[in-house]
Image: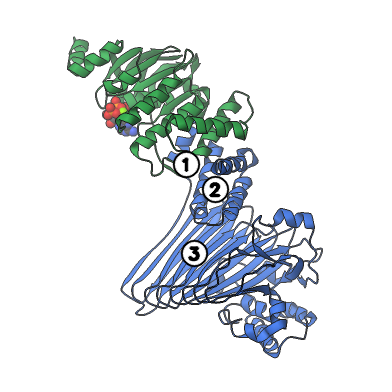
Amino acid sequence: MLEVKDLHVTVEDKAILNGLNLTINAGEVHAIMGPNGAGKSTLSAVIAGKDGYEVTQGTILFEGQDIFEMEIEERARAGLLLGFQYPIEIPGVKNIYLLKAALNAQRAARGEGEIPAPEFMKLVREKSAEMKMDPSFLQRAVNEGFSGGEKKRNEILQMLVLQPKLAMLDEIDSGLDIDAMKVVASGVNSLRSADRAILLVTHYQRLLNHIEPDRVHVLVDGRIVKSGDKELALELEARGYDWVLEESAA
Amino acid sequence: MSAPERFLERLTLRRTDDPSWVAARRQAGAARFEAMGFPTRRDEAWKYTDVRRIAEGDFALASDADFDAARFEAQRLDIDAYRLVLVDGVFSEALSELEGLPDGVQVEPLSRALSVNHEAVGGALGRLAGVDFSPFTALNTAFADEGVVVRLAPGAVVDKPIYVLLLSRANGQAVMSHPRVLIEAGARSEATVIEHYSGEAEAANFTNVVTELLLDRGAIVDHYKLQEAALTDLHVASIHVDQSRDSRFNSYNLNLGGALVRTDLVTDLNGEGAEAAYNGLFFVQGRQHVDNHTLVNHNSPRTFSNENYKGVLDDRAHGVFNGKVFVKKDAQQIEAYQNNANLLLSDRAEIDTKPELVIYADDVKCSHGATTGQLDEDAVYALRSRGIDEPMARALLTLAFVGEVMDKVRLNVIAERVERAVAGRLPERFNLADLVETAEAIQEA
Ligand SMILES: Nc1ncnc2c1ncn2[C@@H]1O[C@H](COP(=O)(O)OP(=O)(O)OP(=O)(O)O)[C@@H](O)[C@H]1O
Ligand SMILES: [Mg+2]
């Protein structure tokens, strides 16, 4: 589904990703861990299409398509969505407007007509209930005045409505209390299916107790230096990153 | 013949059975108008607004109030209200609905108020809007023989909005009208009054309205001006407010229509505890020109004002905002806030904004500001990241910009109507009107 090959990215002439390789197949959940500043957010932002990054080398294919040929909205419509580490507030734009406009954009890209209003209403009410969000949130401006945890739940709500093929979630667990973590995790788990994939960026094993990954990668200095199964996350939790660094230096 | 003479010539067509004080006032208005003439851009208050289109026009006076019934149904606000309708300045008994007014509440056409008991109106009419205020007020005074009189007895609370609908027709011969609205709110009375300007799409008439509001102690009045005139209509208005102690005046000045629109809004806060809120919105496109001149006079200590005007300008539209807050000498413990924010959707749209504070007291909390800009690019990006294309993202953010004022609007019918109008004016494929409907449906469910 996603194939990142030898990706080199610079920001303002500073090298951030240095030959990164990553392959994600449909049906899989991948977790990326690694020290602060390693380039995890950069990777997900480059895949999603945020500007300000210069790709100096490498390719990214999404379902066989070169994503550097696609605008950010085209990538989103094709099913590539990023849940932001710091979701921004959009004063005045009601959540419901964003959801409907985004869903209809996606449908239009598939050649489908607009979703009928009753069907849409049913869908968003169901999904917000799943995220334990009061329907009043739908009428509120996107993230405006939301608590940290509410913002994260709102990101997942968007995912549940838009059903991305590849959902990338950057530190979706930060700032969540224990109950919210469960709600968010069950939302993410409901996105799992044989034809979808999920990429989680996280610092904590705790999230991975709720969302079990198929693969765990350690990203250091702009490269993936170690990959393993879910046991790797447990090991990192227990031992930190130093041993990985030593191993990869050796 | 000069332009003023040409306008005043039409006066002779008017009824001559006016009470003597009305006749005298008419003459004074005519004389003053003739002496002042139409303003030109050399006048500071008209620096950005050229009224030649009015001065050079040829406007007759309407003599009937016929209006297509189906069109009327489509244009009117769907609201349970006491309704009074003027068509090109002529009262329409047929379209009005004034039954069941509570005790202590009088709502009637000016012509009737004058013929039934003109002395009762005489004291208040023209007290705030003198003939010296502007040539247009003088012109209105010369002509005004129709309009609305609203009088609330002390303590009267009107259970439904008072809805004044002023319709403009697409006449073969353009017409002018000079409606006069007088609202006297007794002590502790409460009312919502709507002035709604609408009409046929091709109407190219000249409306010159003067509104006076007198708020006695503790009175609360919400005043809506929803201006949706045809894009070819010419519209000049002045609204004058006198507030006694502890009264509260909320103005909603919402401008969507008109080719040339000028509104003056003046409030005198004359008693302690008096409070005025000015909420304004204009959304103009094509070659529309909308000019808002607002003034708050803090004449008494412990008075409060809060003003927020927002403008959205597209194409080659031109907006003017001139907001002045005046604090009289030794009027202490004043709070006065003023803000004007404008959104330019096109390079060729233009806004002239001038917020102004003139303060002769020291214990004053004031702020004022004006910003003009484009949309927040981070927000555009965030929406695009969800698959929404750029024009749609910009449309959503424009609707949001307007929303900040619309959130203050307490009458849902009006908020929804304006949101829908804004959504509908954006290019069709954005189809925001449909979004607004969905949001409304969810709210109701
Ligand atoms: N716009 C930018 N301008 C300058 N430097 C940047 C920019 N974006 C990222 N960087 C730098 O790139 C490096 C990688 O940042 P990134 O946010 O990808 O790290 P991360 O692995 O997500 O870290 P964390 O765990 O703290 O979230 C950091 O050193 C960061 O300062
Ligand atoms: Mg990060």
Using the rendered image of the protein, determine whether residue A64 is visible from the camera's viewpoint: yes
Closer to us: mark 3 or mark 1? 1
> SS for tag 1?
helix
**In the displayed structure, would residue B22 be above or below residue B324?**
below
The residue wearing badge 2 is B345
Which image quadrant is residue A201 in? top left
**In the displayed structure, would residue B5 be above or below residue A101?**
below
Chain drawn in green: A
Q: In the depicted view, which residue is nearer to us: B81 or B13?
A: B81
Label whose residue precedes the other's in the sequence (3 or 2): 3
**Which residue is painted at 49% across and 71% down in the image?**
B295
Q: Colour of chain B?
A: blue
Residue B421 rendering spot, x and y as whole percentages? 62, 50
Q: CA distance from mark 3 to mark 1?
A: 28 Å
Q: Are discs 3 and 1 located on one and the same chain? A: no
Q: How many marks?
A: 3
Residue A217 rendering spot, x and y as whole percentages? 30, 15
State which image quarter holds ligand 2.
top left
Residue A120 rendering spot, x and y as whole percentages? 57, 32
> SS for tag 3?
strand
Amino acid identity at mark 3: Tyr
Q: Are discs 3 and 2 located on one and the same chain? A: yes
**Which residue is painted at 50% across and 49% down in the image?**
B401
The residue wearing badge 3 is B278
Direction from residue B337 to residue B86 in the image, left or right: right
Answer few, some or many: residues within 10 Å of disc 2's Cα (few below 14, many 20 plus, some between 14 and 19): many
Q: Chain of mark 3?
A: B
**In the displayed structure, would residue B438 be above or below residue B197?**
above
